[in-house]
Image (cartoon, rainbow, N blue to C red):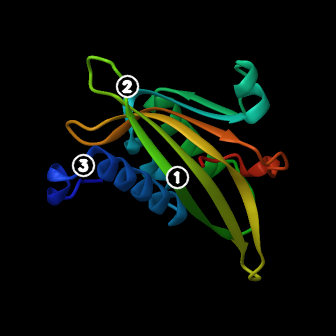
Amino acid sequence: MGSEEHMGDASPRSRVEDLLYRYAEALDDGGFADWPGFFTEEAEYRLIPRENHARGLPASLMLCTGRGMMEDRVVAIREACVFSPHVCRHLYTNVRVAEGGDADGRLDVRANYAVYRTTEDGETVLLSVGRVLAGVVLEPEPRFTRMDVVYETFRIPGLLVYPI
């Protein structure tokens, strides 16, 4: 997961977009093992319904506090989840980047997302839609310090609880 040399001179927004797109590419290409590497060691990942997020309720479909929990989730996906063969495609739009205001140089990121799933018979469906609210540090390499995936699609197949 090395960053490209020319990205050092890129704007913060370009570096954040590159992080999001590499993240999507890893998930879309089946690289769940690579997923934790997009986060700092202490990062938090939440897959949370819009209503719970709006009300400040902590109940999430998936919660990982720290990279270790993310690595455990990868093992669970590989060994315990049973689902029909499919591929996914993540799309990110309306990416917004703002200074987080912390001493560590964290940026606050907001983006809309859509994830499409195509089964081996060629049927494509919209799996999930919503927004990503994240914290990102750019140095030494862009990584997420937190990611809230606020989903609006309520019928997510139960056995497909994997990172979005």
1 and 2 marks in contact (CB < 8 Å): no
Residue in the image at 23% along x and 53% along y: 3
SS at circle 1: strand
Above or below residue 80? Residue 64 is above
SS under mark 2:
loop
Q: Which quadrant of the figure has residue 140? A: top left
Is 103 positioned to the left or the right of 34 in the image? Answer: left
Where residue 81 sits in the image (x, y, percent)? 71, 51
Q: Residue furthest right?
A: 155
**Mark 1 and mark 2: Cα distance apart in space:** 18 Å
Position in image of residue 52 (x %, y %): 76, 26
Kindly state the secondary structure of the residue where label 3 is placed. loop
Residue type at numbered disc 1: Asn
Label 2, label 3: how many angstroms apart (C-alpha)? 16 Å
- Mark linked to residue 100: 2
59 left or right, relative to 137:
right
Task: Please tell me in which quadrant of the rendered image residue 102 appears.
Answer: top left
Q: What amino acid type should be assigned to the residue bearing mark 2?
A: Gly
Q: Which residue is mark 3?
A: 11
Write down the residue under mark 1: 94
The correct choice, above or below, for 34 with respect to 119 in the image is: above
Q: Nearer the viewer, residue 98 or 63?
A: 98
Q: Which is nearer the N-term, disc 2 or disc 3?
A: 3
Q: Position of residue 92 (x, y in %)?
A: 53, 56
Task: Determine whether, in the image, residue 155 is placed left or right of residue 137.
Answer: right
Residue type highlighted by circle 3: Ser
Give the mark nearest the N terminus, 1 or 2: 1
The residue sitting at the bottom extreme is 121
